[in-house]
Amino acid sequence: MSDTITPQATTAETVLEVEGLNVDFWVDGEFYPAAIGLKYDVKRGETLAIVGESGSGKSTSSMALLGLLPPNARVSGRYSLLGRDISSLPPEELRKVRGGQIAAIFQEPMTALNPVYTIGFQIVEALRSQFHDMGPKEAKERAIELLAAVEMPDPPAAFNKYPHQLSGGQRQRAMIAQSISCDPVLLIADEPTTALDVTVQAEILDLMRNLRERLDSAILIITHDMGVVADMADRVAVMRNGVIVEQGPIEQIFSAPQHPYTKQLLAAVPHLGTETTELTDRARAAEREQAKPILSFENVAIEYPKRGRVPAFRAVEGIDLQVLPGEIVGLVGESGSGKTTLGRAAVGLLPIAEGRLEVAGIDISTATQKDLRPLRRKAGIVFQDPGSSLNPRMPIGQSIGEPLLLTGDYDQAKINARVEELLDQVALPRSYRNRYPHELSGGQRQRVGIARALALTPELLVADEPTSALDVSVQARFLDLLQELQAELQFATLFVSHDLAVVDMLAHRIAVMHRGRIVEQGTRDEILRRPKEAYTQRLIAAVPVPDPMEQRRRRLARA
């Protein structure tokens, strides 16, 4: 019998069948359930979306299918691929299936990609591990084709870059290229569009649909973005606390949900264009306009210096932008447009090449590291990738309390009290303070990062995609929390996001970036209701709508 599975090897309609899947984790001397009695299937040419809150067991149960859970996990139940039981395969047999027949797109590309190898090397490695007769030259050509297929800017140059040299969205595209390199019969996509802007997201979803149709394969997509669900899915399974509480066709779930939790999820989804109330009254707006900016960019340029054979690269230039006390400015644009670069410069993590940058009254344009120390108390940042921003050897309570400890102004009792208060604010159980980052889901790790950034009640908060890993219900709680804290403390926020519906809900003003420049800025209504620039209009047109009928109409219009 052959050890591999090919689409031609069976005529079974079902690609993946899961029956009674249970996953438990051994923690502190006892097993804790993460998935309980899951039962579902995915057929040829079909996409099943698994949705639910962060920590509900979506990713855990899917990684169990690939044998990628840590040693303290216990998995039981039966799951089969194209009629073959793979639940009891030994590791060496499962490796022959994984990558070739089943491929995964992971949630956090920075931790999934090897930082010491180039992007091209990693794609070539995946190709040659499955196609043993493929030579290096042929593999390189195929890798560059795959990078082009996922809309990577300058694929030949990207082939030779390391993960840290790419933006978050570009890293995600590189990982998608690697995942689809061997034309899998089943693609498990764990938050595949989390780091992507809306225009590239639409292209990636089209790419995944084309792959599904070309190979008559199946897709299991895990996501908290209900717009992506409406666009991609044929059926939906809703998970809560490790259990599937409801599943059915996409139209039924969106138009006539039965379970109260499903109704709660759909009610929490932000919709672009439905926010009509003024975020602040006129008196408060006028007061802010007279205040001194907390963050001020004046004709700022930021350049990455030449390193070895890599030439210098000017990431942004000509930036004029201000953020006033108590104001939220949304910074939107495509991946690689320079949004994150501006955010990092605002907290002193990147030097500027030209212009003037002032934060909370401190001119950091030419500041030394010693000069930047007072800034650390006045500015906080929430990073895009929570997996790589938290110390893996430090419990999360210690990570949250570290900024307080470093000030020298708090004793341990006050630090403990503040850590518990912050955990409450970001909707994490206080008992989680003793857990390590790898024991939390992606969304839970993001909440830890948010709590850490707010620890010192900063004057400026730079939020770099802070809701990208959060499910819609937790996202809604976080946005409410941010608005409440800001109303009380009046700190300024630079909110970097590709989710225009969230920006619509939150921002007072919006700046649109394209290729390192701000092409348009104004009030929320001016940018989202009456955009002047063609690029802004394209961004808004590409926003996914949590409505299956509308998404189908858009796809037909694009075709």
Image (cartoon, helix red, strand yellow):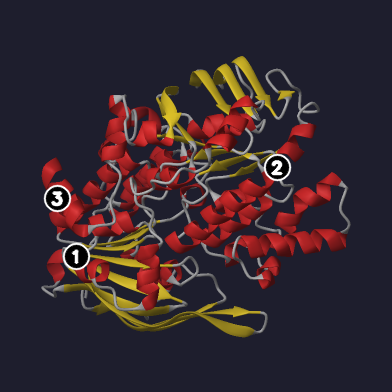
In which quadrant of the rendered view does residue 425 lie? bottom right
Q: Secondary structure at mark 2?
A: loop
Helix, strand or loop at label 1? It is loop
Q: Which mark is residue 46?
A: 1
- Lower position in the chain sequence, tag 1 or tag 2: 1
**Image quadrant where one finds the C terminus:** top left
- What residue is rendered at 32% in x and 36% in y? 529
Q: Which mark is residue 553?
A: 3
Q: Position of residue 552 (x, y in %)?
A: 16, 53
Task: Please say whether residue 559 is visible from this viewpoint.
Answer: no
Q: Residue at x 34, y 30 (%)?
A: 153
Marks 1/2: CA–CA distance? 47 Å
Looking at the image, residue 40 sits to the left or right of residue 362; the answer is left
Whole-number angstrom distance, CA of label 2 to CA of label 3: 45 Å
Q: Which residue is mark 2?
A: 458
Determine whether 287 is above or below 146 in the image: above
- Residue 253 picture location, percent across and down: 26, 70
Residue 66 in percent (x, y) is at: 39, 68
Q: Amino acid at mark 2?
A: Pro
